[in-house]
Image (cartoon, rainbow, N blue to C red):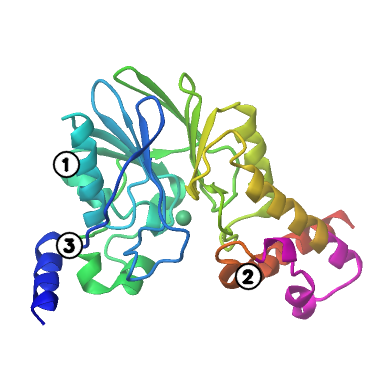
Amino acid sequence: MKYIIILLLTLSSYGFDYDLKPIKVANDVYCFFGKLENINKENAGNMVNTCFVATKEGFVVIDSGPTYAYASQVFEEMQKIAKLPVKYVISTHDHDDHWLGNSFYKSKGALLIGPKTYEKNVVVGMETRMQTALGKELYGKTTIVKLDKVVDDNLTLTVGNKHFEIKQFVEQAHTEGDLVVHLPEEKVVFAGDVVFNGRLTSIRDGSIIGSLKILEHIDALKPKVIVGGHGSKTDANATQALRNYLLDMKKEILKMLDEDVGMDEITSKVIMPKYKEMKLYDVLHKSNVLHVYQELEILDEDEE
Ligand SMILES: [Zn+2]
């Protein structure tokens, strides 16, 4: 009983303890790698990657993470590296696990940058998926804030001694607005959810054709470090796991379309056992197959 009371007191005064330790992935570049899970109360939304770049003038954050409390704990870790302000926060796309920390950084004076879809789909006051899954206590002070700057296709940014190129390469990949952040001198790419490894992606808001195309764009930058939105593999081959999954799926579904396999049968036919051991296969694979089937079916009809 005593232990429970102490635990409750700790939770209410400090919020959830995310136990965050920054991992250095390149010179002046640090990331926090989330768990390869769906959102649940045990991880309090810490199933996503966020990164920060230390410049001489201040920090640039790429994806602010799942909650206000998470962002404030990331900020504490940043301050151990340098006592500098956060200048910019870049949100790679409009899925809420990637930007719900924005309200914390806004309160610290940072400028928020993100894609057109954030502007379009993120409505102040709306109930988020994170909020529903975590409940009031864990969601805490998290609120929704608007962007200060929307990226159309291209934006370059110089902060202190660092250069950032922010690009939307294709119309639709993981979502209808995926920003890729490139540090040309450091040869680092922050890919957001157009790169996954160690777990399956979700194609529900995206396009398989666009996803494959954007991976080509990323590889053409010849980065040494690629940080995806989920998964901790960050070398130059970090795109490979997702590319293989998408290519195999495309091939199998095109073959099924050729054989006139219908929508009602497709999920039982495209099993792709090679990927069964991947985290979140059971949750996401079938819906990915259905989505890709519909996308490729339309393309197929257009060609005929
Ligand atoms: Zn995500």
Q: Please give the label number shown on residue 88.
A: none
What kind of residue is marked 2?
Answer: Ser
Q: Amino acid at mark 1?
A: Lys
Residue assigned mark 3: 15
**103 on left or right of 122:** left
**Residue at mark 1: C-beta within 8 A of ligand 1:** no
Asked which secondary structure carries label 2, the reply is helix
Q: Are marks 2 and 1 in contact (CB under 8 Å)?
A: no
Instruction: Give the camera-side residue of 159 and 22.
Output: 22
Using the image, tell me which numbered label, if any, was put on residue 108.
Answer: 1
Q: Viewer-nearest of labels 2 and 3?
A: 3
Q: Main secondary structure of the magenta part?
A: helix
Say if mark 1 contacts mark 3, CB within 8 Å.
no
Magenta residues, start to end: 254-276
Q: Residue at x 19, y 43 (%)?
A: 76
**Image depth: mark 1 or mark 3 in front:** 3
